[in-house]
Every structure is written in C-alpha cells, then in structure tokens.
Amino acid sequence: MAREVWDAYDKDGNKLGFDLFRDEPIPEGVYNIVVEIYTITESNEVLVTQRHKNKLFALKWEVTGGSVLKNETPEQGAIRELREETGIEVMNSDLNFVYSYNYKNFPSIYKCFIVFINKEKTKIQLQDGETIDYRYLPYNEFKQFIQTDDYVSLLRERFYFHEEQFDTIIIR
C-alpha cells in the first residue's frame, strides 16, 4: 500500500513546497490540513460513524474526516473523505464552510464543512478498515452524545469551540 502524502503548510495555510508523510514526524512550525465534514439530514440529524477497531480511537464515534492529500484543496479532500468513508457523493457547491482551526501544539490545520443530504435518497456505504457502523442522531441528541466517552474527544473540543456557528447553520 502506498504511503499517504500530504502537502506541508505554514500556520497560515500557505504551502511550503515539500511533502509530509503519514506516520512520520512533522517538523516544528509545519502543518498538514485535516478536513471534518458534518453530514446533516433535512430533519437536522447528524451522521456519525464508528471507527474500526484497528484505528486510533478504536470503536469511538465521529463525524467524517481525514487528511487532505498532496495537491488536493480542502474542498476536494472533504468530498473524497465523505465518499470514501460513507459512500456519499457531494459537489463543491454542497460544502458549507464552518471554520478553520489551528492547535498550538498539534501540527494540523482543521477545516470544517457541513453538507446537507436527503436521508431517504442517501445510501451509506462504509469503508473497509475505516468505519464499521453509522447512525443518525437528532442535533440535540448529537450534542448530548458527544459529551460521552464513546465520541472522539478532540472532535468534541472543536465542536464546542464553534458551537454557535454550528447552531446558526444547522438550526435553519
């Protein structure tokens, strides 16, 4: 299997002109871009997926996400990750940008998007080795669920930091 290759960025999201590789240390002051996609139904349910037992945060629940690959834009990465992990096909125009977030002591820039889907017309297809289950949670239940140990804690922190923005976009 080929190694996953990422573009290197500075803290402001400017490309630095060299590559980073999954599972290799990232130099200080250098970042990769990670996308997170909140998939929302017409009745304000949030799609969450359960991580494979062999992944970091094994068997925890999360929204869709992953690293942006070399030469991808964050939007292209979000579209690819959503298709790979859930089988959901969207276009660039379906992505609603929510936030960009940098951790001070973590070498990733997080770009978050929301997509709206028609649940009845959407068939979920989980990715072997990545996701093992899925469920739709009403938005208020989702907000309670992410407080539990069953949810990936780092995602919870970013959600709460931007909760007002989510409320504005999701509760329409």
Image (cartoon, rainbow, N blue to C red):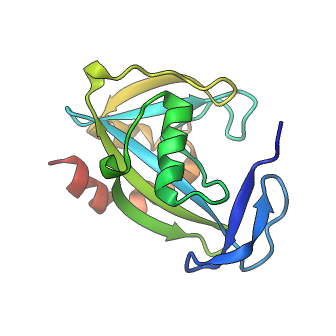
Occupied quadrant, residue 44: top left
Is 75 placed above or below 1 here?
Answer: below
Q: How many marks?
A: 0
Residue at (59, 78) in percent of width and height: 14
Considering every residue shown, the one lying at the far front of the view is: 71
| In this picture, residue 66 sits left or right of residue 136 | right
Q: Is residue 142 visible?
A: yes
Q: Quadrant of the N terminus?
A: top right
Position of residue 30 measured from the top left corner of the image (x, y, whole percent): 71, 75
Residue displayed at 29% across by 25% down: 119
Q: Nearer the viewer, residue 141 or 116?
A: 116
Decide: is 152 above or below 84. below
Tell me if I can see residue 64 in this picture: no
**86 vs 57, nearest the viewer:** 86
Q: Is residue 63 left or right of residue 109?
A: left
User: Looking at the image, which residue is at 44% across and 22% down?
Assistant: 124
Q: Residue at x 21, y 57 (%)?
A: 168
- Residue 80 horizontal/vertical position (percent): 53, 42
Name the spot of residue 109 as percent of width and height, x first. 57, 67
